[in-house]
Amino acid sequence: MEEKKINEGEEKKSLSFVEQMVEKDLEEGKNAGRIQTRFPPEPNGYIHIGHAKAICMDFGVAEKYNGVCNLRFDDTNPSKEDTEYVDSILHDIQWLGFKWGNVYYASDYFQQLWDFAVWMIKKGLAYIDEQTSEQIAQQKGTPTTPGTASPYRDRPVEESLKLFEQMNTPEAVEGSMVLRAKMDMANPNMHFRDPVMYRIIHTPHHRTGTQWHAYPMYDFAHGQSDFFEGVTHSICTLEFVPHRPLYDKFIDLLKEMRGETADINDNRPRQIEFNRLNLTYTVMSKRKLHQLVDEKLVRGWDDPRMPTVCGMRRRGYSAQSIRNFIDSIGYTKFDALNDYALLEAAVRDDLNKKACRVSAVLNPVKLILTNYPEGQSEELEAINNPENEADGSHTITFSRELWIERDDFMEDAPKKFFRLSPGKEVRLKNAYIIKCTGCKKDDEGNVTEIYAEYDPLSRSGMEGANRKVKGTLHWLSVNHCQKAEVRLYDRLFNVENPSADDRDFHDLLNPESLKVLNNCYVENYLSEKKAGDFLQFQRIGYFTLDPDTTPGHLVFNRTVGLKDTWAKINK
């Protein structure tokens, strides 16, 4: 019995504070034991890894407690929204491995929200303000000084009703008036100082077209949408902590309109806040991400340097590695800046189990085996993944003339250089032991060819072929490989926390964030691969085939190196 108690205690301790709160609600019988969450993105851009953290929480809680998570698009600002973003969000959530119960839109509730706003006006709880946004902002006061009431605050109800109807006409001028809730201009919570409920926008909506010209603000639409859908737990990030009292207040009023008792402990959506995901050497602001795309500082939303889910997918990150990373950093009530290296470590760990091992030479120099018969070649076995025997193997062709990495040869090598140099032996992976006999140079002293002799009795797998040599090199047969373009991606910014840096945004960009190599070679076997397949270029790093690949022109993206070199370089 004692052992069971200890195990239960350990299990409770491993739960996030959000899960602990959900379990407490279940134990107390709230919402009749029902769990319903929602993920509510605004379709004004592509989702990034910060959204992925929220997705893992929203969908994860529902999945863990046999509930349902719905997807609801917060489409209350048509000037910034587009169906392109809706489609991308749907695809990214599925790619991450989650399934929603239903798809909703805030626009589904426009009429209900409008009717609620009219009820508030009739109750003297809302009014039309014809001041400019600047004037309204000035009258808000500060957290320590009360605000100043609008000169329109006490305008007659009938006048506000008439003007509210005018707001929703094509003739209404954007910015000429707003609908504000009449609350408390002296409240220390600034969100209660007569918050704006509706504003005028004439941009056609991606779903409702020109049916509406007055649109609800997020604070007015969000809680009510949760209520209409029957959400039990509205899980969001820490910046919404000060919004929570207003969230509850609007629900109180909505319940009053419906003739229901308003009690903070009733079966209503419970807002719970957790910390956002921030990463070093990148930005999460949609405004700045838009700027990167619009100014063509990157190649689009799916540029592999972007923190977007589609960018990480194109770079070769696996969905599981992103989820493992999010799980490892956890959920707290304190914001933190997470090291990008932690994400890359999670990617390496997952890809090590999944990636097919292949040979690629990025900076080639020719190696000629002078004692290997001319015109002869042989097929050697290459294991696809030593971590998973079920992945099988493929063949790689060996011949007299090979490509090796230029950095794997040094004419005057130091003592601890265990690669190829005159008089020294190395093993060619899956093949033979060779001994360097010399090299050829051009007029400028650059090595153009390397010469070596192979030991025909040292082929990998042969009896007696286990003679020890300290270095092992990868290689490609010159006449049995394909040329390829390889894109080497690195940190997008040079500074650890660009969001907190006061310098010009453009000055913080890393000019070395993308290097394109055009004189690379890869195995013929890679022509069978497709975009998104996980690959390990042996001794180099993890790569994937890019969608830019065309017949006869292979393009690869570096996902991540085999080791973290960034920290060493930037010490």
Image: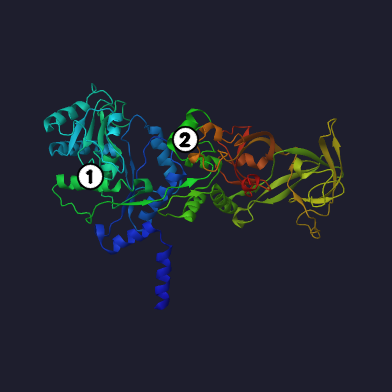
In the displayed structure image, the side of residue 209 where residue 388 appears, left or right? right
Q: Which residue lies furthest to the front in this view?
A: 145
Which image quarter is the N terminus in? bottom left
Q: Nearer the viewer, residue 521 or 22?
A: 22
Instruction: Please name the residue shown 24% across and 52% down the image.
Output: 268
First in sequence: mark 2 vs mark 1 = 1
Q: Quadrant of residue 243?
A: top left
- Tell me: residue 245, above or below residue 550: below
- Tell me: residue 352, above or below residue 210: below
Q: Nearer the viewer, residue 27 or 399?
A: 27
Q: Does the rendering let one see residue 142?
A: yes
Colour scheme of the picture: rainbow
Q: Distance between the residues labelled 2 and 1?
A: 33 Å
Q: In which quarter of the image is residue 316?
A: top right
Instruction: Please name the residue shown 27% across and 34% down the image.
Output: 139
Pointer 2 residue = 289
- Kind of residue at badge 2: Leu
Of helix, strand and loop, which one carries label 1? helix
Residue 215: x and y, percent? Answer: 27, 32
Q: How crowded is mark 1: few (under 14 residues within 10 Å), some or many (20 or more)?
A: some
C-beta proximity under 8 Å, tags 2 and 1? no
Of helix, strand and loop, which one carries label 2? helix
- Kind of residue at badge 1: Phe
Q: Residues within 10 Å of mark 2 (few under 14, many from 20)?
A: many
Q: Residue furthest top?
A: 171
Q: Residue furthest bottom?
A: 1
Pointer 1 residue = 250
Residue 211: x and y, percent? Answer: 25, 28
Q: Which of 375 and 201 is in front in this view?
A: 201
Residue 428: x and y, percent? Answer: 77, 49
Residue 413: x and y, percent? Answer: 82, 46
**Residue 5 — which label?**
none
